Image (cartoon, rainbow, N blue to C red):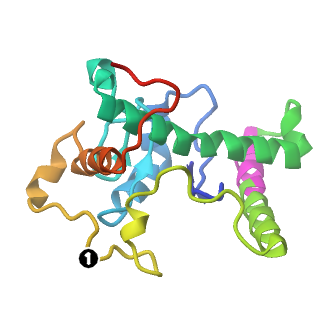
Amino acid sequence: MVLDSRCRFLFLAAAAPGGTNDIVAFRKCGIQRYINSLSLGRYVIGDNAYVCSEQLLTPFAGVERNDLRKDAYNFYVSQLRIRIEMAFGMMSNQWLILKRPISVSTKTFGKLILCIGVLHNYCVRERERLLGGTTGGTGPVNVVDEFADEEGNAGENAFRPSDVSVLDVPGNSIMRDFLVDQIAAAGLRRPGGALS
């Protein structure tokens, strides 16, 4: 699944059982095609189960986490990833069927989950309409969108790699490095005591 900053589903699939390895489900459900089709400067935040790329940004792992700048990036990325947990909480509180074991056929289960996802998005939009704004905001850091125009297109100051051929190095991301630099330039750090 892919969510936006307002906890709305942009991509939702019920293509594999819950115990399926993340990478297996990722490859099976078509989300990889969705992510790879994102325009330059648009990306999805994932966890370390995935390989970092220009469209799928992941936290730094291992000794790289000890770098203060990368630690700050990891903190703010985790704040964005919390939206997934928020959406699950919103769904399970709204749709009580999710609070108990669901006894439907496997054929029907996927349709049920997709239906709940559509209804969830409808409820989020209606709540925003009734409250006269958005619920949830954009998260603590959204450095790329501050360079976007009203339609969300990258502006003249947005990230643009000068050597597009470098974009295909698995596990590395120019976009991730750009965000690390932007977070550091903004003076942002992990609150409550950073690593030394």
Choose between 19 and 165: the one closer to the eye.
Answer: 165
Residue 2: image x %, image y %? 54, 52
User: What residue is disc 1 on?
Assistant: 156
* Start-end of magenta stretch: 106-116
As drawn, 45 above or below 191: below
Q: Is residue 165 left or right of residue 9?
A: left
Q: Main secondary structure of the magenta part?
A: helix
Q: Is residue 9 left or right of residue 44?
A: right
As drawn, 151 above or below 53: below
Q: Secondary structure at mark 1?
A: loop
Q: How many marks?
A: 1
Kind of residue at badge 1: Glu
Residue that appears at 30% across and 49% down: 185
Few, some or many residues within 10 Å of mark 1 (<14, 14–19, 20+)? few
Residue that appears at 11% across and 51% down: 166
Residue 90: image x %, image y %? 78, 47
